[in-house]
């Protein structure tokens, strides 16, 4: 409120006597020149490495190209190829599995843990570090660790199976288990950020709502579900988008490092399939189509998610 | 009495889940000092019988000092350029009224939630055409160009500075650049800290782009040296040495995190578009 007021007050004072009240004088040429100068460095890099690639990415999907020769315009040939490429649809299924297995548990666990550590008790501030600390890990570092955990000969899971007299399972080379195993690692990697975002959201929920709920005799679970959860809906929305994007696109790093897309393509999501088409098959046009497809999927899942939450939760 | 019991219950739950979450990482630290027989033992050992510091010597030699230096060049290059471009842009977009301001802002907003992996291939194409693949420039500039979040964050921050303050400087005869450097920038220290910590961490942990842009020995960064350990560590190198290498790669970010934890959580909350 106060911020708004000071802004308005300053805005009123801003027109010093020389400036005429006509609308045109809102902009001053000298101001514009300085503004563009301050913006230029950011604009150059941003246009060069974000805007141009985005446009080029769409454009290349209509070309046949191998990075080196002259690109050949082929119209919709790459899109037609997509329609008949069963491997691409298989990898689309893998992408959807990553999203399906990953997003909801990440949000649910992250929310519950944030509520748990959102306690106003001495010492909790320090204990929170335990929850935040995996955020410093790269996919590469955690891959070294989790590859060991899943290793049938030396890892703890393999050792446990041996003690129980069960046959060893090579989890990362098992068609059914490899993908869930990667998702578990990704959930673990994503939790700190989700918890931090929810903590920020929880701290904006006004205290008196809780006291009112307590007065009405609401128990802790009831309060959690009917008071806390709806009050962090905007955080959930942001977290959901970030996580959908995370599981569609970032599975590339994870599967590339840990399974190289195997076994038998069981962890080759669209992102990795596109990467292969570009950098192993040198089929840049087709790879671009696959990238466009990923964007469509992200937008579709977010749109569908909004639709569903509007229908059933409001 | 009941309240006290509840509190103890909550404390124990917080500690329990905290340990579950932190456990893999704590085990990484402990395992990096274990001998081969320690780490392969069942039931698993929590601590090494005797710490084998030689694991770190081997890991250091495997990673090479050059790779560590490369990583610092890469990360500080990205950080420095990002601050140098995003701060003035955020300032111009929030405090200077000029025609086209909202259009430029909209341009920066467009890819805000678009994962950079989606434009990986065309970014590689552009970098290739510029002839800087395999160099630090090619490694750093495309990452530094991801300016959306920074511009948005700094624009939001500068918008909270009272206009009167900026006006006062302008009336005193300061031009926009002086106003930016002398008035706005010193006040932005907290948000710069928050953004820097997050950027440092993100850049430090990048894998795919360095793999594509500059995988050669002169520019190779730590994640590239580590990744092969996740698949071949069990044939060539003892897992403990792999762990030690992972710890070496983790220490700088861990230090940054512990020292700047307050800024870090703020930065995440800020860059999460909160």
Image (cartoon, coloured by chain):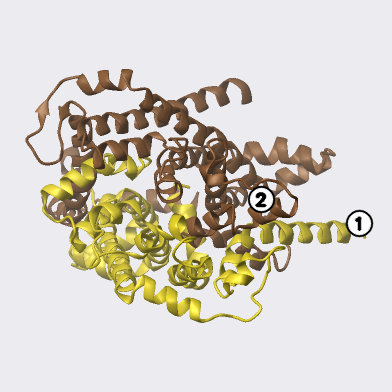
Q: Which residue is mark 1?
A: B2
Residue at 61 percent across and 67 percent down: it is B39
What is the spatial separation of the Cα atoms under label 1 and label 2, in whole angstroms? 23 Å
The quarter of the image holding the C terminus of chain A is top right
- Please identify the quarter of the rendering in which residue A232 is found: top right
Residue topped by disc 2: A113
Q: Of residues A143 and A193, which is closer to you in this image?
A: A143
Q: Residue furthest left?
A: A70
- Helix, strand or loop status at disc 1: helix
Residue B213 can be seen in this image: yes
Q: Percent position (x, y) of residue B48?
A: 64, 75
Q: Nearer the viewer, residue A115 or A232?
A: A115
Q: Please give left or right for residue A136 compared with residue B90 in the image.
A: right
Residue A9 falls left or right of residue A150:
left
The chain letter corresponding to brown is A
Q: Does residue B176 appear in this view?
A: no
Tell me: A140 left or right of B155: right
- Residue A103's spot in the image, x, y percent? 54, 38
Q: Position of residue B41 (x, y in %)?
A: 66, 66
Q: Could you tell me if the residues under marks 1 and 2 are in contact, i.e. CB atoms within 8 Å?
A: no
Q: Quadrant of residue B215?
A: bottom left
């Amino acid at each position: 409120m106060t911020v708004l007021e000071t802004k308005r007050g300053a805005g009123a004072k801003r027109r010093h006597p020389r400036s005429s009240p006509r609308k045109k004088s809102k902009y001053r040429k000298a101001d514009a020149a300085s503004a563009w100068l301050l913006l230029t460095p950011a604009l150059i890099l941003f246009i060069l490495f974000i805007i141009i690639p985005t446009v080029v990415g769409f454009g290349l999907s209509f070309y046949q190209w191998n990075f080196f020769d002259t690109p050949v315009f082929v119209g919709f040939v790459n899109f037609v190829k997509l329609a008949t490429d069963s491997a691409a649809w298989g990898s689309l299924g893998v992408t959807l599995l990553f999203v399906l297995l990953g997003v909801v548990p990440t949000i649910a666990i992250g929310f519950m843990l944030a509520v748990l550590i959102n306690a106003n008790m001495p010492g909790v501030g320090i204990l929170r570090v335990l929850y935040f600390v995996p955020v410093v890990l790269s996919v590469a570092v955690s891959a070294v660790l989790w590859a060991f955990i899943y290793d049938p000969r030396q890892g703890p899971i393999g050792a446990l199976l041996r003690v129980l007299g069960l046959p060893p399972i090579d989890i990362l080379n098992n068609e059914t288990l490899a993908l869930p195993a990667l998702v578990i690692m990704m959930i673990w990697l994503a939790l700190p950020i989700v918890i931090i975002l929810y903590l920020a959201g929880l701290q904006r929920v006004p205290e008196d709502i809780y006291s009112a709920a307590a007065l009405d005799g609401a128990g802790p679970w009831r309060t959690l579900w009917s008071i806390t959860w709806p009050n962090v809906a905007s955080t959930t929305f942001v977290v959901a988008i970030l996580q959908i994007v995370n599981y569609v696109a970032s599975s590339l790093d994870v599967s590339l490092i840990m399974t190289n897309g195997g076994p038998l393509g069981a962890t080759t999501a669209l992102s990795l399939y596109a990467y292969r088409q570009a950098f192993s098959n040198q089929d840049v046009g087709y790879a671009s189509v696959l990238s466009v497809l990923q964007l469509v999927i992200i937008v579709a899942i977010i749109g569908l998610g909004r639709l569903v939450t509007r229908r059933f939760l409001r | 009495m009941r309240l006290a019991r509840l509190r103890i219950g909550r404390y124990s739950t917080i500690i329990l889940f905290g340990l579950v979450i932190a456990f893999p990482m704590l085990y990484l630290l402990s395992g990096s000092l274990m001998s081969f027989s320690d780490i392969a033992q069942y039931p698993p050992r929590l601590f090494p019988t005797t710490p084998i510091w030689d694991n770190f010597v081997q890991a250091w030699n495997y990673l090479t000092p050059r790779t560590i230096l490369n990583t610092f060049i890469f990360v500080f290059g990205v950080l420095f350029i990002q601050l140098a471009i995003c701060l003035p842009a955020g300032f111009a977009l929030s405090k200077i009224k000029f025609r086209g301001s909202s259009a430029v802002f909209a341009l920066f907003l467009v890819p805000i939630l678009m994962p950079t992996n989606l434009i990986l291939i065309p970014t590689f194409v552009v970098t290739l055409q510029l002839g800087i693949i395999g160099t630090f420039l090619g490694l750093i500039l495309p990452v530094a160009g991801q300016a959306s979040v920074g511009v948005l964050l700094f624009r939001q921050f500068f918008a909270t500075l009272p206009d009167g303050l900026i006006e006062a400087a302008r009336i005193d005869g300061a031009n926009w650049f002086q106003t930016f450097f002398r008035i706005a920038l010193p006040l932005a220290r907290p948000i710069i800290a928050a953004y820097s910590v997050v950027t440092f961490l993100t850049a430090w942990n990048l894998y795919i782009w360095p793999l594509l842009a500059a995988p050669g020995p002169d520019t190779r960064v730590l994640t590239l040296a580590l990744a092969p350990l996740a698949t071949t560590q069990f044939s060539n190198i003892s897992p403990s040495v792999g762990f030690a290498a992972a710890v070496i790669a983790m220490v700088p970010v861990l230090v940054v995190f512990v020292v700047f934890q307050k800024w870090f959580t703020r930065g995440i909350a800020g860059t999460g578009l909160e």
